[in-house]
Amino acid sequence: MPDPIFSDLYQDTEHLIWAPTEQVRRRGRERARRTQLAAGLAAAVAVAVVATGVVLARPDAAPPPVPPATVEPITPTPAPTPSSTPSAEPSASGTPTPSRTAGEPVASIGGGPTSRPPSRTIPAAATLQLADLPAGFRMSTDTDGDWSLQTVSMLCANPAPALDVNQVAIREVAFHASGDSVVQRITRHSGTSAAEVMRRVRRLATDCEPNRPGDSVSILADSLGGDDGLLVGSESEGTPARWLVVRQGDLVTQLFVDRQTTPTEARRLARSVANRLCAGTDTC
């Protein structure tokens, strides 16, 4: 009879069916292998953690490779559009010179000749000076009276051409001496009108149809000085008169001179007049 201590155990296991011995041994071996494999994996993980800590702790160890960053394409910035505003460019001497703007003529850069509007003034230096006349004359601003060449048209029966073509400026001056006077008028004309004025002076002198017998208007001398120069004479009732007309650039001057002025005297005076006009025009 079994021992009383094991009687309960015997009763519980009396009807159990026990697995064959070989099957029990196989299960034991499989369980042992699983236990060894789990222990090996745990050891490997522990070694890897320690090794990683050592690598991070070593200052001379190379850091782990960093994955390459994504590089975005750079869009090139377009070059600035050239401005139409003039900009300063250094010259050979280092002094800035103005650049050409859009639409500006090349000749205007660096002080070249340009087409500019005429000045609205005439400088005093453009008039005849006391040094150009014989001693004894004095300068005056008293230019009153009907002395201009236009008044000679009163001697003509036919209409006379006007001489104030596109006139933009005027200056007058007078020189008086004992028993003698020289009165000067300078006019500035726009465009090429100064040359037209000289053509009209010639027409006035050559086309005049006298009102009365003995009256006359004529050209006494030509090509006296400047760009163009004339000595125009008239006579009315036996009294002569003389005008010296000179053009320089866009300036035209007429001088009421002595009634006995000869072509030789007129030529000498015309040279001085033309030189003085250069102070008022850039064509000289």
Image (cartoon, rainbow, N blue to C red):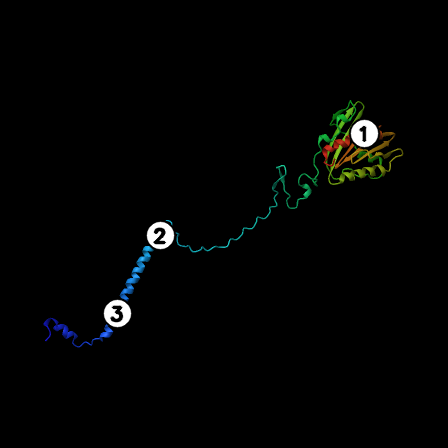
Label annotation for residue 268 = 1
Secondary structure at numbered mark 1 = helix
Amino acid at circle 3: Arg
Amino acid at circle 2: Leu
Secondary structure at numbered mark 3 = helix
Residue extending farthest right: 213
- Dividing the image into 4 quarters, which one contains the N terminus? bottom left
Q: Along the line of sight, which residue is nearer the eye, 147 or 181?
A: 181
Cα distance, mark 2 to mark 1? 110 Å
- Residue marked by disc 3: 29
Classify mark 2: residues with Cα within 10 Å, few (<14), some (14-19) or many (20+): few
* Residue 36 placement, left or right of 64: left
Sequence-wise, which precedes: disc 2 or disc 1?
2
Q: Residue at x 81, y 29 (%)?
A: 268
- Residue marked by disc 2: 56
Cα distance, mark 1 to mark 3? 146 Å
Residue 73 at what x, y percent from top left? 50, 55
Q: Is residue 275 above or below residue 112?
A: above
Q: Residue at x 26, y 68 (%)?
A: 31
Q: Residue at x 76, y 31 (%)?
A: 275
Q: Are marks 2 and 3 in contact (CB under 8 Å)?
A: no
Amino acid at circle 1: Arg
* Closer to viewer: mark 2 or mark 1: 2
